[in-house]
Image (cartoon, rainbow, N blue to C red):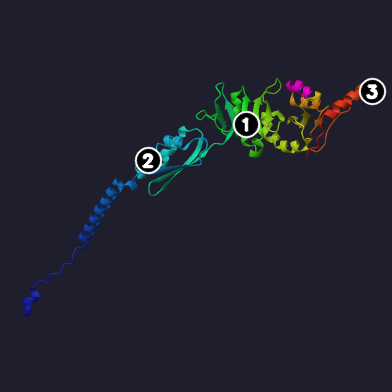
Amino acid sequence: MAVYQERIPHVKQQLPKKRSNRKLLFILLLFFLAILVVIFIRSPYSKVSEIQVYGNDTYTKEEIVKASGLNVGMQFLNVWESQVRENLKSLKGISAVSLVRQFPGIIQLRVEEFDRVAYTTTSQGQRYPLLQNGEVLKQVDFSKRMLDRPLILQWNSPELLPQLAKALANISPAILGEISDISLTPTAYDKQRIILHMRDGNEVRSVLYKLDQMIVWYPGIVKQIPEGEKGIVSLFERPWFVKYGTPEQTAADTDSGQSPDSAADETSETSGQISAEGGTQAEEQPNEDQEAESERQDQTDQSTEINFE
């Protein structure tokens, strides 16, 4: 009997197949996830409910949203930052944009715009901003907005506008805010001669290629001008000031066609010359008689001597 039992082969007990159970659970999980996705897509939470715009000044919120291609009601998960950035390239005044999603349904557009440094005007009264990159933005008319930048009155050389924009962008906001208008007044000696009318009533004459370097002296010059006096502040190689209504102003206007150095030399003989070292230069000329001496003294009394440091 024992011999027969030894000849019967032993059958191994089979364990339950766990892999089949796991596969079934995985299929069920996918099924329920698919159901949840369908429910989410059909629910209001899957739609864009609000579009917020931050950092805009040149463009309105409506203009930016329209150009971005976004709209309320579109799929929240179907919003791509790269596409929005590409769409907003049509707005030349925007330099950068970022997109932020906030659940549920809120899209935030954070834009950065090029700074406005001046305004140009047309014969029809339209006013367009000159941006810091040198481009005149004709997409937006600023004629009904507050004038918060200098106004370009006369400028017959459009190729110099990028250079003007660069110079104005380098000027501090405090000084830039004091400039009322700018005109290009080329001469035979210098095609980049400019005139700036300041909001305090003074007139500044300089050259475009040195404007951002020389205009920094203006606040210090104004502090040393006697109260109530207004005139011409010339910012060439050597700054000097001439009061309005004096013979020296007439001489300065007559010399406007000369080179900056020669005009400064001739006018400074009778006007108060501003020196960066802190002195006032003047040359005394011999007179033939007492009457000429008296006349020279009267003219000297009309001009203002300024010690500028």
- Give neighbour class at mark 1: few <14, some 14-19, many 20+ (Cα, 10 Å): many
The x and y percentages for residue 67 are 43, 34
283 with respect to 108 (left or right): right
Question: In what quadrant of the picture does the C terminus appear?
Answer: top right
- Give neighbour class at mark 3: few <14, some 14-19, many 20+ (Cα, 10 Å): few
Q: Residue 83 or 149: which is nearer the viewer?
A: 149
Residue displayed at 94% across by 23% down: 290
Q: Earlier in the sequence, mark 3 or mark 2?
A: 2
Disc 2 marks which amino acid?
Val
**Which secondary structure lies at badge 3?**
helix
Above or below residue 148? Residue 157 is above
What secondary structure is the stretch in magenta mostly built from?
Answer: helix
- Disc on res. 104: none
Check disc 1 and report the residue beneath it. 150
Cβ–Cβ below 8 Å for labels 2 and 1?
no
Label 2 to label 1: alpha-carbon separation:
39 Å
Q: Which of marks 3 and 1 is nearer the N terminus?
A: 1
Name of the residue lying farthest toward the bottom = 2
Above or below residue 67? Residue 11 is below
> Which residues are the magenta region?
249-258
